Image: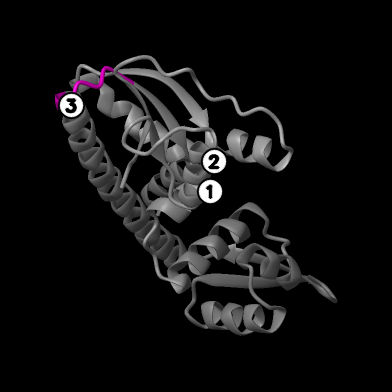
Amino acid sequence: YCILRYHVQCLNIFLAKQSATKIEIFLKMTPEELRTLTLFNTVESSPEVNQRQLAQELDVSLGLTNTYFQRVLKKGWIRAKQVKARRWLYFLTPQGALEKSRLSLSYMHRTLDSFRELKSKGDEHLRILSQKGIRGIHLCGENDLTEILSFCFSGVEIELLSVIPEKTLLADCVQNEQHALPDLSSGELILLASMEHRASLAELLNKQGLQKNQHWVLFS
Protein backbone atom coordinates (compact mmCIF):
# COMPACT_ATOMS: atom_id res chain seq x y z
CA TYR A 1 0.00 0.00 0.00
CA CYS A 2 2.88 2.38 0.80
CA ILE A 3 4.35 1.74 -2.66
CA LEU A 4 0.95 2.45 -4.23
CA ARG A 5 0.67 5.69 -2.29
CA TYR A 6 4.11 6.72 -3.53
CA HIS A 7 3.14 6.18 -7.17
CA VAL A 8 -0.15 8.02 -6.69
CA GLN A 9 1.72 10.99 -5.18
CA CYS A 10 4.06 11.06 -8.17
CA LEU A 11 1.08 11.04 -10.51
CA ASN A 12 -0.55 13.82 -8.48
CA ILE A 13 2.49 16.00 -9.13
CA PHE A 14 2.16 15.26 -12.84
CA LEU A 15 -1.57 16.05 -12.86
CA ALA A 16 -1.13 19.23 -10.81
CA LYS A 17 1.03 20.63 -13.61
CA GLN A 18 -1.66 20.14 -16.21
CA SER A 19 -3.79 23.20 -16.86
CA ALA A 20 -7.47 23.11 -17.73
CA THR A 21 -6.56 23.89 -21.31
CA LYS A 22 -4.30 20.87 -21.49
CA ILE A 23 -7.09 18.68 -20.29
CA GLU A 24 -9.43 20.09 -22.93
CA ILE A 25 -6.84 19.53 -25.66
CA PHE A 26 -5.41 16.16 -24.72
CA LEU A 27 -7.73 14.36 -22.40
CA LYS A 28 -9.95 11.74 -23.99
CA MET A 29 -11.51 10.45 -20.78
CA THR A 30 -15.21 9.81 -20.46
CA PRO A 31 -17.19 12.33 -18.36
CA GLU A 32 -17.54 9.70 -15.62
CA GLU A 33 -13.79 9.00 -15.54
CA LEU A 34 -13.07 12.71 -15.37
CA ARG A 35 -15.59 13.26 -12.58
CA THR A 36 -14.17 10.31 -10.63
CA LEU A 37 -10.62 11.59 -10.91
CA THR A 38 -11.74 15.11 -9.93
CA LEU A 39 -13.61 13.70 -6.94
CA PHE A 40 -10.56 11.70 -5.82
CA ASN A 41 -8.29 14.74 -6.08
CA THR A 42 -10.78 16.95 -4.23
CA VAL A 43 -11.39 14.51 -1.38
CA GLU A 44 -7.68 13.81 -0.97
CA SER A 45 -6.79 17.52 -0.79
CA SER A 46 -9.89 18.59 1.19
CA PRO A 47 -11.34 15.77 3.34
CA GLU A 48 -13.83 18.22 4.90
CA VAL A 49 -15.38 19.13 1.53
CA ASN A 50 -19.17 19.25 1.48
CA GLN A 51 -21.38 18.21 -1.41
CA ARG A 52 -22.19 21.77 -2.44
CA GLN A 53 -18.49 22.50 -2.82
CA LEU A 54 -18.01 19.18 -4.59
CA ALA A 55 -20.81 20.06 -7.03
CA GLN A 56 -18.85 23.19 -7.97
CA GLU A 57 -15.69 21.15 -8.51
CA LEU A 58 -17.52 18.59 -10.65
CA ASP A 59 -19.54 21.29 -12.43
CA VAL A 60 -22.82 19.38 -12.00
CA SER A 61 -26.01 19.94 -10.02
CA LEU A 62 -26.20 19.25 -6.28
CA GLY A 63 -28.70 16.42 -6.82
CA LEU A 64 -26.48 14.72 -9.40
CA THR A 65 -23.48 15.17 -7.10
CA ASN A 66 -25.31 13.42 -4.26
CA THR A 67 -26.32 10.51 -6.53
CA TYR A 68 -22.83 10.19 -7.93
CA PHE A 69 -21.17 10.46 -4.52
CA GLN A 70 -23.38 7.73 -3.04
CA ARG A 71 -22.40 5.51 -5.93
CA VAL A 72 -18.69 6.05 -5.26
CA LEU A 73 -19.22 5.30 -1.56
CA LYS A 74 -20.95 2.02 -2.44
CA LYS A 75 -18.03 1.04 -4.65
CA GLY A 76 -15.80 1.36 -1.59
CA TRP A 77 -13.54 4.00 -3.15
CA ILE A 78 -14.38 6.68 -0.57
CA ARG A 79 -14.91 6.28 3.18
CA ALA A 80 -17.06 8.73 5.17
CA LYS A 81 -16.55 9.58 8.83
CA GLN A 82 -18.97 11.73 10.83
CA VAL A 83 -17.14 14.10 13.19
CA LYS A 84 -20.06 16.35 14.18
CA ALA A 85 -23.84 16.36 13.82
CA ARG A 86 -23.76 17.80 10.31
CA ARG A 87 -20.10 17.49 9.45
CA TRP A 88 -18.39 14.66 7.63
CA LEU A 89 -14.84 13.87 6.60
CA TYR A 90 -14.11 11.81 3.50
CA PHE A 91 -11.07 9.64 2.84
CA LEU A 92 -9.72 7.71 -0.11
CA THR A 93 -9.68 3.97 0.61
CA PRO A 94 -6.93 1.61 -0.64
CA GLN A 95 -9.37 0.53 -3.37
CA GLY A 96 -9.97 4.18 -4.22
CA ALA A 97 -6.24 4.85 -4.35
CA LEU A 98 -5.86 1.93 -6.74
CA GLU A 99 -8.64 3.25 -8.99
CA LYS A 100 -7.13 6.74 -8.88
CA SER A 101 -3.78 5.28 -9.88
CA ARG A 102 -5.41 3.48 -12.81
CA LEU A 103 -7.21 6.62 -13.99
CA SER A 104 -4.09 8.75 -13.56
CA LEU A 105 -1.96 6.31 -15.54
CA SER A 106 -4.63 6.20 -18.24
CA TYR A 107 -4.64 10.00 -18.35
CA MET A 108 -0.85 10.10 -18.58
CA HIS A 109 -0.69 7.54 -21.39
CA ARG A 110 -3.38 9.32 -23.38
CA THR A 111 -1.67 12.65 -22.85
CA LEU A 112 1.68 11.25 -24.03
CA ASP A 113 0.02 9.65 -27.05
CA SER A 114 -1.63 12.96 -27.95
CA PHE A 115 1.67 14.77 -27.42
CA ARG A 116 3.43 12.41 -29.84
CA GLU A 117 0.63 12.78 -32.39
CA LEU A 118 0.70 16.59 -32.26
CA LYS A 119 4.50 16.70 -32.41
CA SER A 120 4.50 14.38 -35.42
CA LYS A 121 2.03 16.69 -37.18
CA GLY A 122 4.15 19.68 -36.21
CA ASP A 123 7.31 18.05 -37.59
CA GLU A 124 5.58 17.33 -40.90
CA HIS A 125 4.10 20.83 -41.08
CA LEU A 126 7.48 22.50 -40.55
CA ARG A 127 9.18 20.13 -42.99
CA ILE A 128 6.75 21.21 -45.73
CA LEU A 129 7.22 24.90 -44.89
CA SER A 130 10.98 24.46 -44.92
CA GLN A 131 10.78 22.96 -48.42
CA LYS A 132 8.83 26.05 -49.50
CA GLY A 133 11.65 28.30 -48.37
CA ILE A 134 10.27 29.48 -45.04
CA ARG A 135 13.08 30.32 -42.62
CA GLY A 136 11.29 32.03 -39.74
CA ILE A 137 8.02 31.38 -37.88
CA HIS A 138 6.00 33.43 -35.42
CA LEU A 139 3.80 31.01 -33.45
CA CYS A 140 0.37 32.34 -32.55
CA GLY A 141 -2.15 30.37 -30.51
CA GLU A 142 -2.83 28.50 -27.31
CA ASN A 143 -0.02 28.32 -24.78
CA ASP A 144 0.02 24.54 -24.52
CA LEU A 145 -0.18 23.86 -28.24
CA THR A 146 2.50 26.41 -29.08
CA GLU A 147 4.65 24.89 -26.35
CA ILE A 148 4.44 21.48 -28.01
CA LEU A 149 5.13 22.91 -31.47
CA SER A 150 8.18 24.74 -30.15
CA PHE A 151 9.84 21.33 -29.70
CA CYS A 152 9.57 20.71 -33.45
CA PHE A 153 12.00 23.45 -34.49
CA SER A 154 15.14 21.58 -33.43
CA GLY A 155 14.94 19.27 -36.45
CA VAL A 156 14.38 21.83 -39.23
CA GLU A 157 16.14 24.86 -40.67
CA ILE A 158 13.38 27.19 -39.50
CA GLU A 159 13.87 29.62 -36.64
CA LEU A 160 11.18 30.17 -34.03
CA LEU A 161 11.11 33.98 -34.00
CA SER A 162 8.42 34.64 -31.41
CA VAL A 163 5.38 33.23 -29.63
CA ILE A 164 2.22 35.34 -29.66
CA PRO A 165 -0.38 34.27 -27.04
CA GLU A 166 -3.83 34.21 -28.59
CA LYS A 167 -5.32 35.68 -25.40
CA THR A 168 -3.26 38.82 -25.91
CA LEU A 169 -4.51 39.32 -29.46
CA LEU A 170 -8.13 38.56 -28.58
CA ALA A 171 -8.03 40.89 -25.55
CA ASP A 172 -6.60 43.68 -27.71
CA CYS A 173 -9.38 43.08 -30.22
CA VAL A 174 -12.09 43.39 -27.56
CA GLN A 175 -10.53 46.59 -26.22
CA ASN A 176 -9.96 47.97 -29.74
CA GLU A 177 -6.25 48.35 -29.04
CA GLN A 178 -3.36 48.01 -31.47
CA HIS A 179 -2.52 44.36 -32.09
CA ALA A 180 1.00 43.27 -31.24
CA LEU A 181 1.69 41.61 -34.59
CA PRO A 182 5.25 41.25 -35.94
CA ASP A 183 6.53 42.84 -39.11
CA LEU A 184 7.10 39.95 -41.49
CA SER A 185 10.30 39.81 -43.52
CA SER A 186 10.84 37.67 -46.60
CA GLY A 187 10.73 33.97 -45.72
CA GLU A 188 8.72 34.54 -42.54
CA LEU A 189 5.19 33.42 -41.66
CA ILE A 190 2.77 33.40 -38.76
CA LEU A 191 1.78 29.83 -37.84
CA LEU A 192 -1.71 29.93 -36.36
CA ALA A 193 -1.99 27.13 -33.79
CA SER A 194 -5.35 27.36 -32.07
CA MET A 195 -8.11 24.85 -31.37
CA GLU A 196 -10.89 27.02 -29.98
CA HIS A 197 -10.34 30.49 -31.46
CA ARG A 198 -8.88 29.78 -34.90
CA ALA A 199 -11.79 31.44 -36.72
CA SER A 200 -11.56 34.63 -34.65
CA LEU A 201 -7.78 34.79 -35.03
CA ALA A 202 -7.98 34.18 -38.77
CA GLU A 203 -10.50 37.00 -39.11
CA LEU A 204 -8.28 39.28 -37.04
CA LEU A 205 -5.25 38.56 -39.22
CA ASN A 206 -7.26 39.13 -42.40
CA LYS A 207 -8.44 42.50 -41.08
CA GLN A 208 -4.81 43.44 -40.56
CA GLY A 209 -4.18 42.80 -44.25
CA LEU A 210 -2.41 39.48 -43.64
CA GLN A 211 -3.47 36.89 -46.19
CA LYS A 212 -3.70 33.15 -45.60
CA ASN A 213 -0.86 31.13 -47.18
CA GLN A 214 0.98 34.35 -47.96
CA HIS A 215 1.49 35.82 -44.51
CA TRP A 216 0.06 33.14 -42.26
CA VAL A 217 -0.81 29.44 -42.32
CA LEU A 218 -3.06 27.32 -40.19
CA PHE A 219 -1.77 24.37 -38.17
CA SER A 220 -4.29 21.55 -38.45
Type of the residue with mark 1 = Ser
Q: CA distance from mark 2 to mark 1?
A: 6 Å
- Lower position in the chain sequence, tag 3 or tag 2: 3
- Left or right, 40 with respect to 25, comes to right
Density class for disc 3 (Cα within 10 Å; few <14, some 14-19, many ≥20) is few
Give the magenta part as a residue range: 131-136
Q: Which residue is mark 3?
A: 132
Q: Quarter of the image holding residue 63?
A: bottom right
Residue 99 position within the rendered picture, expressed as x and y whole percent measured from the top left: 40, 65
Whether 98 is among the magenta residues is no
Type of the residue with mark 3 = Lys
Question: Is 84 drawn above or below residue 180 in the view shown?
Answer: below
Does the CB distance between marks 2 and 1 fall below 8 Å? yes
Q: Residue at x 51, y 43 (%)?
A: 201
Q: Which residue is mark 2?
A: 204
Q: Nearer the viewer, residue 139 or 109?
A: 139
Q: Which residue is mark 1?
A: 200
